Image (cartoon, helix red, strand yellow):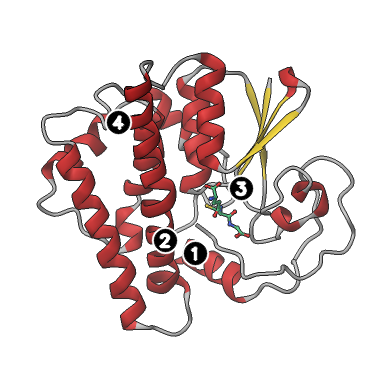
Amino acid sequence: MITLYTAATPNGWKVSVALEELSLQYDVRALSLKRLDQKQDWYQALNPNGRIPTIVDRSAGDFAVFESGAILVYLAEKTGRLMRETPKDRSQVLQWLMFQMAGVGPMMGQANVFYRYTPEQIPYAIARYQNESRRLFEVLDRRLEKREYLVDEYSIADIANWCWVQTYPWSGVSIEGLSNLEAWLARIRERPAVERGIAVPAPENMGLTAEQFAESARKILVDTSVPEEPTTEGEGEAPTEIGAPVSTPDPV
Ligand SMILES: N[C@@H](CCC(=O)N[C@@H](CS)C(=O)NCC(=O)O)C(=O)O
């Protein structure tokens, strides 16, 4: 059994999609990013970075893994699935996984921050992160020419990239003219495990309108001081007082 600490964001979905694809048994602890659950001591003992997602593998001596890319590799190695076998193929899966971790995720995340959440509009920052995201989409599109998946067979590299790229409208980045990318987005979307994975957790944000979601995300960024309600979720002793985070939380 695996415990997944998560929230309804692309980095969280990467793990719930992989767990669904692998038919692994897991239970979900939904963290409220707005309430800063991720900054609590009990959680940072599992994830020193104070962000979601994290897994704890109960069948491996309560082994905790943080960083979504590392979690995907851990799950692939645990099951021998969603990863290619030869050293060269495996390297290619890792290359496209790292491409997501170091490029697509951070760039789209910053595009979201400047396009959606900052109270002040900074055109240079918006353009910089949207253009860089679009450039990365073009790299993916070229890679997917005559390929169904990034390393030919569906792998953790596809899961990682797909969970971010499919949120392109939220980042305000166009996929116009990128027909290989568009076909790949649709192909993966059809997978039942993906459909189940992106419905995890039964999120606080689900059922919100786009405007309500944006407002909630803006509050995470701008109002970082005091939680509105006490922490009741998660494991261990929930402290009665929550300190201000050391840095501005990043909602996605
Ligand atoms: N590199 C990390 C990034 C994790 C991350 O940025 N998570 C965001 C949600 S997608 C988060 O927890 N934000 C809340 C915060 O920064 O406090 C990973 O891939 O696991």
Q: Which residue is mark 4?
A: 188
How dense is the environment of label 2, judged by Cα within 10 Å: few (below 14), some, or many (20 and up)? few
Relative to the observer, which residue lies in front, 98 or 219?
Answer: 98
Q: As displayed, is residue 190 above or below residue 220?
A: above
Q: Is mark 4 within 8 Å of ligand 1?
A: no
Q: Are marks 1 and 2 in contact (CB under 8 Å)?
A: yes
Q: Residue at x 40, y 39 (%)?
A: 97
How dense is the environment of label 1, judged by Cα within 10 Å: few (below 14), some, or many (20 and up)? few
How dense is the environment of label 4, judged by Cα within 10 Å: few (below 14), some, or many (20 and up)? many
Q: Position of residue 61 (x, y in %)?
A: 78, 22
Q: Which residue is mark 2?
A: 210
Q: Are marks 1 and 4 in contact (CB under 8 Å)?
A: no
Q: As displayed, is residue 59 above or below residue 138?
A: above
Q: Which residue is mark 3?
A: 52
Q: Amino acid at mark 3?
A: Ile
Q: Quadrant of residue 226?
A: bottom right
Image quadrant in which the N terminus is located: top right
Q: Quadrant of residue 27?
A: top right
Q: Residue at x 29, y 66 (%)?
A: 130
Q: Which residue is mark 1?
A: 212
Residue with the most extreme front position: 87
Q: Is mark 3 within 8 Å of ligand 1?
A: yes
Query: Does residue 150 appear left or right of residue 167 in this picture?
Result: left
Which of the marked residues, 3 or 1, is nearer the chain's N terminus?
A: 3
C-alpha gap between disc 1 and disc 2:
6 Å
Query: Does residue 199 appear anywhere in the picture?
Result: no
Q: Position of residue 218 (x, y in %)?
A: 53, 71
Q: Position of residue 142 (x, y in %)?
A: 15, 43
Mark 3 or mark 1, which is nearer to you?
3
Which of the marked residues, 4 or 3, is nearer the chain's N terminus?
A: 3
Q: In what element is the residue under mark 3? A: loop
